[in-house]
């Protein structure tokens, strides 16, 4: 049997945490043969609720679960972690300015970055889900100098899946027929969902839809889908976000399929003119636990403008947290 993998989940008592943990425990993330040791991190006030989730996880009698522990101390929660799903974050409260939000999250992700630096396993990989996800990943990485920055990624797979689903609905094709959708930039309304390179049943997606649908309906629908979910459901995306976090990590560990890619926010190496170090979404291929930004794609004038606008937002978030001494 495979060796157990230690998975740390933060914000474990939250709504995404609840949708995430049972699927990780069932093998949906790392595979049906891989035992998992789950380490749940919560704030002290929510640790008891996380203990309640642990009781339920026990009651599932998942054969793959090799450990179940709850912590309110990041240093303990990340001890020996191979995989981190950083979901817990400070939501924006009433009257909170953007700088307050960045500062509150800076306090969380700097401490967690340090805990990861000091205690995580040598192959540690993280996906940050908690918003502002890209900048939180940047903060965590900059407090973990001994861990390669490339291991700190942020989630745009939910945006990617939303784009696939919208393209499938518009063309009438099954989602399984769609390849090479991409999300660029920030996980925010400034993101650029891109179907320029996408295929539907092997043919160009752009032969099936026109530019006015792409610019007028598709892009805003995907970029503002989070707000649409809140207005219709009365709560923010939870199960779909958990599903995307599982896909993000499963693909990173097990690899993307031939002829396809995924979208991940990763520290830029300067590709496509995105300033080095900014955690920005790109199309990436993955294999054997590594990822590579897809190179050589044609970027239209339209795409350039969209990518530059989202990257400018990321640069301003980085400048704000730099001003706070967080990176
Ligand atoms: P909830 O408010 O339901 O849960 C968050 C949990 O995190 C709470 O239980 C809280 O106690 C815990 N927490 C807060 N600070 C913590 C800390 N320092 N250490 C450990 N736990 C801590 O939010 P939920 O709906 O689960 O969403 C979690 C985060 O995901 C939010 O920041 C949200 O904005 C973000 N999202 C990101 C998405 C993405 O695509 N990247 C989409 C979904 C989601 O909106």
Image (cartoon, rainbow, N blue to C red):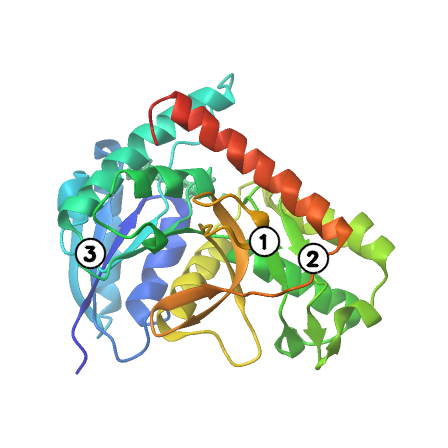
Horizontal relation, residue 282 to residue 213: left or right: left
Residue on which the image places disc 2: 299
Q: Gap between marks 2 and 1, in whole Å?
A: 8 Å
Mark 2 touching mark 1, by CB under 8 A? yes
Horizontal relation, residue 28 to residue 188: left or right: left
Query: Which numbered mark, 3 or 1, is in the foreground of this view?
Result: 1
Q: Residue furthest top?
A: 95
Instruction: Count neighbours of disc 2 (C-alpha within 10 A) and say few if under 14, some if 14 to 19, many if 20 or more.
Output: few
Query: 83 or 24, which is in the foreground?
Result: 83
Q: Quadrant of ligand 1?
A: top left
Mark 3 touching mark 1, by CB under 8 A? no
Which numbered circle lies on residue 8? none
Does the residue tagged 1 have its C-beta within 8 Å of any atom of ligand 1? no
Which numbered circle lies on residue 272? 1
The quadrant in which the C terminus is found is top left
Instruction: Count neighbours of disc 3 (C-alpha within 10 A) and say few if under 14, some if 14 to 19, many if 20 or more.
Output: many
Residue 276 locus on image (x, y percent): 46, 45
Secondary element at tag 3: loop
Decide which of tag 2 and tag 1 comes sooner along the chain: 1
Residue 180 locus on image (x, y percent): 62, 69
Q: Gap between marks 3 and 1, in whole Å?
A: 33 Å
Query: 256 or 12, which is in the foreground?
Result: 256
* Viewer can see residue 231: no
Secondary element at tag 2: loop
Residue on which the image places disc 3: 81
Decide which of tag 2 and tag 3 comes sooner along the chain: 3
Residue at (38% x, 24% y) in the render: 103
Q: Gap between marks 2 and 3, in whole Å?
A: 38 Å
Residue at (19% x, 46% y) in the render: 117
Q: Is residue 51 above or below residue 166?
A: above
Horizontal relation, residue 321 to residue 270: left or right: left
Residue at (45% x, 42% y) in the render: 133
């Amino acid at each position: 049997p495979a060796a157990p993998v230690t998975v740390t989940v933060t914000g474990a008592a939250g709504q995404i945490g609840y949708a995430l943990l049972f699927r990780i425990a069932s093998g949906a993330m790392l595979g049906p043969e891989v035992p998992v040791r789950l380490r749940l991190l919560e704030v002290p006030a929510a640790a008891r609720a996380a203990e309640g989730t642990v009781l339920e996880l026990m009651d599932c009698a998942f054969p793959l679960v090799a450990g179940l522990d709850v912590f309110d101390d990041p240093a303990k929660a990340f001890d020996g972690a191979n995989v981190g799903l950083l979901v817990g974050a400070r939501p924006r409260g009433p009257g909170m300015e953007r700088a307050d939000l960045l500062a509150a999250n800076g306090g969380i992700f700097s401490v967690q970055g340090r805990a990861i630096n000091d205690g995580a396993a040598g192959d540690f990989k993280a996906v940050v889900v908690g918003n502002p996800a890209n900048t939180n990943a940047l903060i965590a990485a900059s407090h973990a100098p001994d861990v390669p920055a490339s291991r700190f990624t942020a989630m745009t797979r939910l945006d990617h899946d939303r784009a696939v689903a919208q393209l499938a609905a518009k063309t009438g094709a099954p989602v399984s027929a769609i390849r090479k959708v991409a999300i660029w930039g920030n996980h925010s309304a400034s993101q650029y969902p891109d179907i320029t390179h996408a295929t539907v049943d092997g043919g160009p997606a752009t032969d099936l839809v026109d530019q006015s649908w792409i610019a007028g309906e598709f892009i805003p629908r995907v970029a503002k889908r989070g707000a649409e979910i809140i207005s219709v459901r009365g709560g923010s995306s939870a199960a779909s976000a958990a599903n995307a976090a599982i896909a993000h990590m499963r693909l990173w560990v097990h690899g993307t399929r031939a002829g396809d890619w995924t979208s991940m926010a990763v520290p830029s190496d300067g590709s496509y003119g995105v300033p080095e170090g900014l955690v920005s979404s790109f199309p990436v291929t993955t294999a054997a636990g590594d990822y590579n930004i897809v190179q050589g794609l044609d970027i239209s004038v339209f795409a350039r403008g969209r990518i530059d606008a989202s990257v400018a937002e990321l640069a301003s978030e980085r400048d704000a947290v730099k001003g706070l001494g967080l990176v």
